[in-house]
Amino acid sequence: MYAAVVHALGQPPRYESVPEPVPGPGEVVVEVLAAALYPLVRSFASGGHYTGGDALPLVPGFDGVGRTAAGELVYIPGLEPPHGTMAERVAVPASALMPVPRGLDPVAVAAVMNPASSAWIALRERGRLREGESVLVLGATGNAGRAAIRLALDQGAGAVVAAGRDPEALRAAAALGAHRMVALTGSDEEVAAAFGAAAADVDVVLDYLWDRPAELALDGILRHRADLTRTLRWVQVGSAAGPDMTVPSAWFRKADVSVCGSGLGSISGARRAAALRELLARLPALAPTTEAVAVPMADIGSVWESPASSGSRFVFVPGGGERPAGAREAAQDREPV
């Protein structure tokens, strides 16, 4: 069979012949129909992810959608290096496989599950959003940020504030239902004041940026917050703006601020699996937030380092780049988020 293979950390993978997977105890072989490319996948392939691991050669790909020998469409929830989903077939623990609801396009599911699960777990498991509460999405113009807006509203958020740098993407966030916008442009004083005006009394912050934007957001919120004893639940999800943030210690003494992270090590595997199953079940009722761009696996080397356009994601598929057999018919019935 064929797979994408990384031979040097940080270098694009090559499409080449590899041995067939040999299932271990409790494992089954699954035919991979679609596997998405996103920052986590690149991070694993570069050896730079915080969970570590630098074994070579490795097959990239964290999750994907596949078909079992019995013909069941399933979601593959997370394979870590060196055995990834960007291969024609993979061996997966049977207990880990999750059924994909009928009528969903495998390529579209593969494109959306990582950003949507990032937002879903942050909101449900870490931020513990309650109906009627308000949410600030810091970094709302990316795929995960857009999914966070949609999912927060789906969970009954009373208001959603979207913060980002791209004006066009912020307009798209408004179209998704965000109530207020914060443009990360202008001087530091202007940006902090904008956060104070738009997000002073939010309950939950989903932070995909960190670094200076997070500093300005927290400063602006605390300087304008009407009740500093009202808990601000800050969920750190990503660091697109940079890995470090400077926080004056007084900020945590003058206000009730609870900070936690949301990532692969922040909740148990059982809780993560339960959250993913819950999200999959909700997909048919959610409107699209991420466009899937199907790419034949053979072309992986040429697009590996190419950025997808805003709101879209590359999804590698076997064969010539068309949606796998059976997926086109399913897509006619329903497209997920």
Image (cartoon, rainbow, N blue to C red):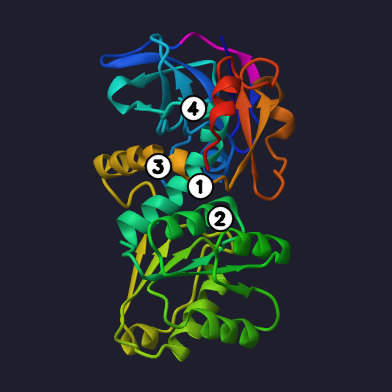
- 105 left or right of 202? right
Q: Which residue is mark 1?
A: 115
Looking at this rendering, what residue extends furthest in the front direction?
Answer: 333
Instruction: Give the residue type that dot 4 points to.
Output: Gly
N-terminal of the pair, mark 2 or mark 1, is 1
Along the line of sight, the residue nearer the viewer: 100 or 191: 100
Tell me if residue 31 is in the magenta stretch.
no
Q: In the rendered structure, which amino acid carries the disc numbered 2?
A: Arg
Give the CA distance from mark 2 to mark 4.
23 Å
The residues bearing labels 2 and 3 have C-alpha atoms spaced at a distance of 16 Å
Q: CA distance from mark 1 to mark 4?
A: 21 Å
Name the spot of residue 48 as percent of width and height, x first. Answer: 52, 45
Say few, some or many: other residues with alpha carbon within 10 Å of mark 2 (under 14 / 14 to 19 / 20 or more).
many
**278 up-or-down from 165: above or below:** above
Question: What label sits on residue 103 in the rendered view?
Answer: 4
Mark 2, secondary structure of its residue: helix
Give the numbered dot on residue 146.
2
Specify which label sits upstream in the sequence, 1 or 4: 4
**Circle 3 SS class:** helix
**Magenta segment range?**
15-20
Q: Amino acid at mark 3?
A: Arg
Query: How far is disc 3 from disc 1 in space, using C-alphas?
Result: 15 Å
What amino acid is at disc 1?
Answer: Pro
* Badge 4 element: loop
Looking at the image, do the residues carrying marks 4 and 3 touch, with CB atoms under 8 Å apart? no
- Find residue 94 and report its image quarter: top left
Question: Which residue, given by chain and number where applicable, does mark 3 sit on?
Answer: 282
Determine contact: label 2, label 1, CB under 8 Å.
yes
